[in-house]
Image (cartoon, grey):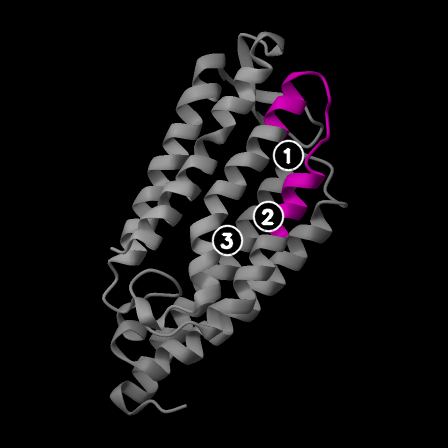
Amino acid sequence: MTMKNKGSIFLSTAITLLPIVLYLLVYHQLPEQMGMQYNAEGAANWYAPKAVAVFVVPAVLALIHLFALVKMRTDPNRKNISVAMQIIKEWTIPAASILITVYSILQNTGTHIGNIVPLVTIGFILLLIGNYIPKTHQNFTIGIRTPWTLKNADNWNKVNRLAGWLWIISGVILILSAFIVTSTIEILMVVLLIVVLMIVPPIIYSYVLQKKHGSNLQN
């Protein structure tokens, strides 16, 4: 691993842990039991001790971030991952860590901003990823990885083109739903729909292509 890569990992991990500093700046303004999850009305429905939110959550995100980076950088087919997707992969968790912290601080200090901001943010992330998934070739880290896409480049290309469109559609649905849904149940239904839409059709399509064309699949 080059010094440049090590520096990038260090910087992105440090940013993932930056929320600890942000929390400490307002530590005495935070309640002892902090809201960790909010319903559509903006009321907290799950609480955790202040120390968990301030120290444990950023630390867990940093560990997940490091695991994801090591997995990507040791992928034997890393050269097939587009530069844009590598950047997205490297900076999504650090950015999410900062956004989650700002949202948490506002919610827990009396400034309620509801669910519009987080839903729209996630929606735009899905749009961004959906745009670049089709440009990523076979690898073991990013993209729709089924036994059939990993064995056949044409299967991979066709399936990930479909996945790209589905992720974009899912992002649009999530952004629109942020201004429409009025209850927690509705949010959960939208999220479930999006998860199914992003994952199930590409897997089925990959299987159908393999059964129909096998190793003779061509673009």
Horizontal and vertical percent for residue 201?
46, 67
Q: Is residue 117 above or below residue 160?
A: above
Residue nearer the viewer, 199 or 117:
117
Q: Badges 1 and 2: C-beta atoms under 8 Å apart? A: no
Mark 3 is on which residue type? Val
Q: Earlier in the sequence, mark 3 or mark 1?
A: 1
Q: Is residue 116 above or below residue 161?
A: above
- Label 3: state its secondary structure: helix
For mark 2, what is the residue?
122
Of tags 1 and 2, the one toward the viewer is 2
Of tags 3 and 2, the one toward the viewer is 2
Give the residues in magenta: 103-123
Label 1 Cα crowd, 10 Å radius (few <14 / some 14-19 / many 20+): some
Residue nearer the viewer, 110 or 14:
14
- Label 2: state its secondary structure: helix
Q: Locate the C terminus by quadrant.
A: bottom left
Horizontal and vertical percent for residue 12?
43, 43
Residue nearer the viewer, 187 or 75:
75
Q: Is residue 191 visible?
A: yes
Mark 2 is on which residue type? Ile
Main SS of the magenta part reads: helix
For mark 3, what is the residue?
195
Give the Cα distance between marks 1 and 2.
17 Å
